Image (cartoon, rainbow, N blue to C red):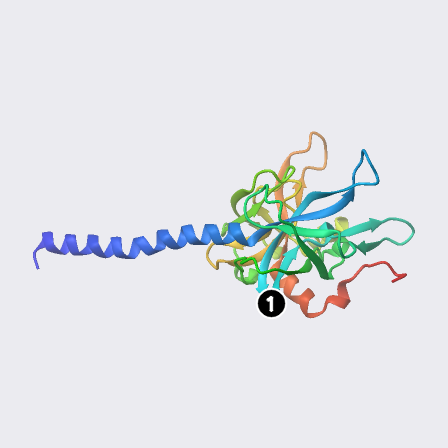
Amino acid sequence: MTIKGLIAGLALMLLAVGAPANAQDRAFRHKVYDSSVQLYILEPDQNDSSKLFDNPACTATAFEKTPKGYHLLTAAHCVVNEHKGLFTWDEVAPDGTLSITTGDPGNVDHTPATVLMVGNWHDGWDVAVLNVETTTVIPVIPLGDDTKLEMGDKIVSVSAPNGGEIKYWFEGYVSAAHHQIDELLGHQVRSWQNSTFIQLPGFPGSSGASVVSVDQQAIIGIYTSDVSEGFPPYQRIAGAMTPVSVVKEFIANPKLHLNLDPKK
């Protein structure tokens, strides 16, 4: 084979290998987009207490197919009402008050959602599992392995913050794994006890969105909050996520990490 023929052959090989990768990337982006759904909570109308309206509150992601629908992941603080007093406890949003919409924002077809299990987000278990029964096809993103992550690993997320009118694609990277965080910080900010910190945009309404590893193409955490400087004017430093290893431990032992209304 001549040099010219060898170069031409290599070029064809590169094209053959490169094309599926690009197609896979686009398919992956659409899969993450479509698996991320808007989570709504039914609230009284501030202008007329006799009326209720669906408020786009958070984001959820399909991670498991069921015979009648799907199981979704979101953040615990998205689906509880916090009660403060001598002993702090939470009350889970009652059945009939949660719903999801799929596809692009503006979809008026609401699907009821119910809470299967919810963690004590005050102590770092900011995870909840929802159930929906629907015939609508929602792509499923599997649970990954955050223990394999290193700082700088690429991650993505999809959410519809700021009123839920636009569904955004966000990209970023792991900023600080759990072992890189001073244990004292978990005592100072209880809700960060199990957190991993990430450089990934997030705003009100992004809570509950799954953080997806580009390499694993799987969920490696749940977006929960922002990390900002402690003095005004506050500057955003990073985002915080509940890692999927904590999610898996919670799903295996949900009753160990609850903080619910003691009267029920």
Residue shown at 23%/57% (left/top)? 13
Residue 161, horizontal then vertical, whole percent: 62, 40
Vertical placement of 92 versus 236: above or below? below
| Residue closest to the eye, 88 or 60 | 60
Residue shown at 61%/66% (left/top)? 68
Residue shown at 47%/54% (left/top)? 214
Label total for image: 1
List the single residue furthest toward the right: 86
Q: Quadrant of residue 126?
A: bottom right
Q: Quadrant of residue 142?
A: bottom right
| Residue closest to the eye, 169 or 185 | 169
User: Type of residue at label 1?
Assistant: Thr
Residue at disc 1, secondary structure: loop
**Residue 215 appears left or right of 123:** left
Residue 204, horizontal then vertical, whole percent: 67, 40
The quarter in which the N terminus is drawn is bottom left
Q: Is residue 25 visible?
A: yes
Q: Which residue is mark 1?
A: 66
Q: Is residue 151 visible?
A: no
